[in-house]
Image: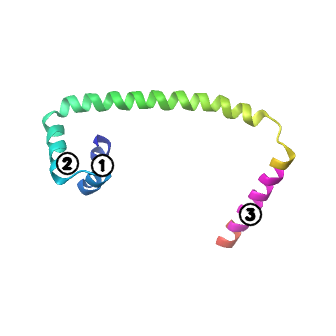
Amino acid sequence: MIYYLKAEYPRKYIRDYYDLTDEQIDGALSYIETHREAVEVEYQEIMRQAEETRQYWEERNREHFARIAAKPRRPESEALRLKIMERRRQREARKK
């Protein structure tokens, strides 16, 4: 919820996103305001952990995708890729 508050999402959006009643969102917002410092510390820890996780998977996927890219393409895959690229080019040409 803190993310949405910091991003200045409307109260109604936050309430609907979390499927809360007006009473529940009032309680949550009151708690956050009363315990602002503790909530902020917890939020920063969650954000730190999320960033560590993102970096871990980005690195792990980088190596995985590099191995895949290094493999030679199968002829049938290459033909399909070229067909997709041609359709994309045609679609883009129609947009102009």
| Mark 1 and mark 2 residues within 8 Å of each other at the beta carbon | yes
Foreground label between 1 and 3: 1
Packing grade of label 2 (10 A; few <14, some 14-19, many >=20) is some
Magenta segment: 78-91
Whether the magenta-drawn stretch holds residue 14 is answered as no
Cα distance in 3D space between marks 1 and 2: 9 Å
Residue depicted at 47% across the width and 29% down the height? 53
Examine the residues drawn in magenta and state their main secondary structure: helix
Question: What residue lies at 44% left-to-right and 31% top-to-bottom?
Answer: 51
Q: Amino acid at mark 3?
A: Arg
Q: Which mark is residue 18?
A: 1
Residue corresponding to mark 3? 87
Q: Judge by depth and name the residue closer to the eye, 93 or 14.
A: 14
Assess disc 1: are there few (<14), some (14-19) or many (≥20) residues with their C-alpha within 10 Å of its C-alpha.
Answer: few
Q: Does residue 62 show up?
A: yes
Q: How much space separates mark 1 and mark 3, taking CA atoms?
A: 40 Å
State whether residue 53 is above or below residue 83.
above
**Compared with residue 21, is residue 91 higher up or lower down, i.e. above or below?**
below
Quadrant of the frame with the N terminus: top left
Q: Which mark is residue 25?
A: 2
Q: Quadrant of residue 36?
A: top left
* Badge 1 amino acid: Tyr
